Amino acid sequence: MTANEYWNDIPLLILSYEESYKIKQRIKQRKEQYLNEHNAWLAGFYNNRAIVSAFSKDIQYPNSLLFWEEAKKAEEERTLTIEQKREKAEKEMKDYLMRKSNTKP
């Protein structure tokens, strides 16, 4: 709120600014709470993987950060042009059809 609004506008304007501030604070709190819960979940998942990989020969502890490859792939997708996306889709379709034709008897 500017000084001009404070001194020259209607007094009820202060209440709307206060309500806006409270809403922004609630949103900020919820984001922080979500991030904390997400980080706690990831820590639990890493711990689970560590314990399971210690007792099992089939499951390996992850070599890289979980979900890192997916995030990296999504970022690369955003930077592609339409023509590059079309070429990539065509290549993936050809690869899929080749694999499908090789697996049928």
Image (tube, rainbow, N blue to C red):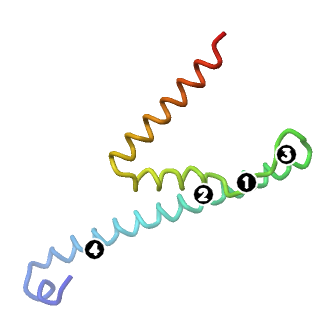
Work out how far the residue at label 3 is from the one at label 1, CA to CA, in angstroms.
12 Å
Q: Closer to the observer: label 3 or label 4?
A: 3
The amino acid sitting under disc 2 is Glu
What is the quadrant of the C terminus in the image? Answer: top right
Work out how far the residue at label 2 is from the one at label 4, CA to CA, in angstroms.
29 Å
Query: Mark 3–mark 1 contact, CB under 8 Å?
Result: no
User: Element at badge 2?
Assistant: helix
Q: Closer to the observer: label 1 or label 4?
A: 1
Residue at image point 35% right, 51% down: 81
Return the disc, 3 or 1, that comes first in the chain's sequence: 1
How crowded pointer 1 is (Cα within 10 Å; few <14, some 14-19, many 20+) is rated as few
- Residue 23 vs 98, above or below: the answer is below
How crowded pointer 4 is (Cα within 10 Å; few <14, some 14-19, many 20+) is rated as few
Name the residue carrying label 4.
Answer: 18
Identify the mark at residue 27; answer none if there is no mark: none
Name the residue carrying label 2.
Answer: 37
User: Element at badge 1?
Assistant: helix
How crowded pointer 2 is (Cα within 10 Å; few <14, some 14-19, many 20+) is rated as few
Name the residue carrying label 3.
Answer: 52
Residue at image point 34% right, 45% down: 83
